[in-house]
Image (cartoon, rainbow, N blue to C red):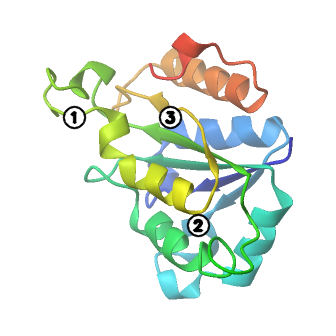
Amino acid sequence: MKTLVVLSHPNFAASRLNKALANAAKSAGAEVRHLEGLYGTDALKIDVAAEQEAFLRADRIVFLFPMMGFNVPSMLKAYIDYVLSRGFAYGQGAKIAGKQLQIAVSTGGGLGEYSKHGAIKFSLNEILLPLQCCADFCELVYGRIFASCGVEPGVPDSAIESHAARFTKLLNDELEEHEYQI
């Protein structure tokens, strides 16, 4: 299965986890496109045609990002707005129906905080529901959210390596049900 990883992280240079996940994706044979690395933070510079071509080459698309303000980073939001356009992603002439969309999110807070009993009061599924709505509207197959939680500065290298190993298993379709959100 050909996989495209659309990575958005506005401070990628400082991110140990997302670097490790991007490297794991490359090692697993995925194409990785780091939006800020390609276009900076100017959404108007996104090369829509190039991004749509990359999207079409893949069977599975993974949105890889850190949770920011209970949402996706701004460049990923712009990507969704511009790349997943009428005639390409939905409407007459749509070209992407049936492809898989996988969400891979990282959070500073622990998984337990993302529940009605936790500090956040909402689950990751509830917070990221707009991505599922987008997938459904574009007739994409929406996968279970892959989450790397509790990743704050100072987390041991072994924890980063563990998340990267799980991500590799996800990309190789070897991830067990209980391993999606840790």
Residue 98, placed above or below residue 182? below
Q: Earlier in the sequence, mark 1 or mark 2?
A: 2
In x, y percent, where is residue 37?
60, 67
Q: Amino acid at mark 2?
A: Leu
Q: CA distance from mark 3 to mark 2?
A: 21 Å
Residue 47, placed above or below residue 145? below
What residue sits right under mark 1 in the picture? 122
What residue sits right under mark 2 in the picture? 35
Of helix, strand and loop, which one carries label 1?
loop
Of helix, strand and loop, which one carries label 2?
helix
In x, y percent, where is residue 35?
59, 66
Between 77 and 37, the one lying in front of the other is 77
Q: Earlier in the sequence, mark 3 or mark 2?
A: 2
Which numbered dot is residue 145?
Answer: 3
Q: CA distance from mark 1 to mark 3?
A: 14 Å
10 lies left or right of 110: right
Q: Quadrant of residue 23?
A: top right
